[in-house]
Amino acid sequence: MAVSGSGGWLRLADQTTPTRRAGTTTVPREPLPDVIPSSRLSLLFFTIAAIAVANTAIVVIAAANVNNVVDADAARQNEEEEATAAIESL
C-alpha cells in the first residue's frame, strides 16, 4: 500500500486490483477509503500521547504515595523506640 501526502491529506494507493479465484470469474476487492484527513491522524497521535502521559503521572503519584507511607511508618516506629527508651530510662 503506497501512501503519499499532499496538502494535509494522505492518499491511499488504488486498492481495487482484482483478485483471482480458481474456477471463478474475477472478483474485485472492496476499495479502501480514498483519503484520510491528517487531522484525524494527529488527533489519534495526541490522544495516545495524552494517555501515556496520564499513565506516567499515575505511576509517579502512586510511587510517591508508597514512599510517603514508608517514611511515615519509619517515623512512627522511631517515635515508639524513643518513647520505649525514655520509659526504660526511668
Image (cartoon, helix red, strand yellow):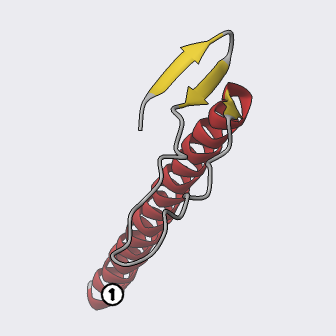
* x and y percentages locating residue 64 in the rendered image: 46, 57
Left or right relative to 63: residue 34: right
Question: Which residue is found at the position 57% from the left and 47% from the top?
Answer: 48
Read off the residue under disc 1: 84
User: Does any portion of residue 34 appear in the rendered image?
Assistant: yes
Question: Which residue is found at the position 40% from the left and 75% from the top?
Answer: 79
Question: Which residue is found at the position 38% from the left and 64% from the top?
Answer: 20
Instruction: Return the residue nearer the eye: 63 or 13.
Output: 13
* x and y percentages locating residue 14 in the rendered image: 54, 36
Left or right relative to 4: residue 83: left
Quadrant placement of the N terminus: top left
Helix, strand or loop status at disc 1: helix
Instruction: Return the residue nearer the eye: 74 or 89.
Output: 74
Instruction: Return the residue nearer the eye: 89 or 35.
Output: 35
Left or right relative to 47: residue 12: left
* x and y percentages locating residue 65 in the rendered image: 50, 64
Seen in the picture, residue 87 relative to 33 is either above or below; the reply is below
User: Does any portion of residue 90 appear in the rendered image?
Assistant: no
* Residue type at the position of mark 1: Thr
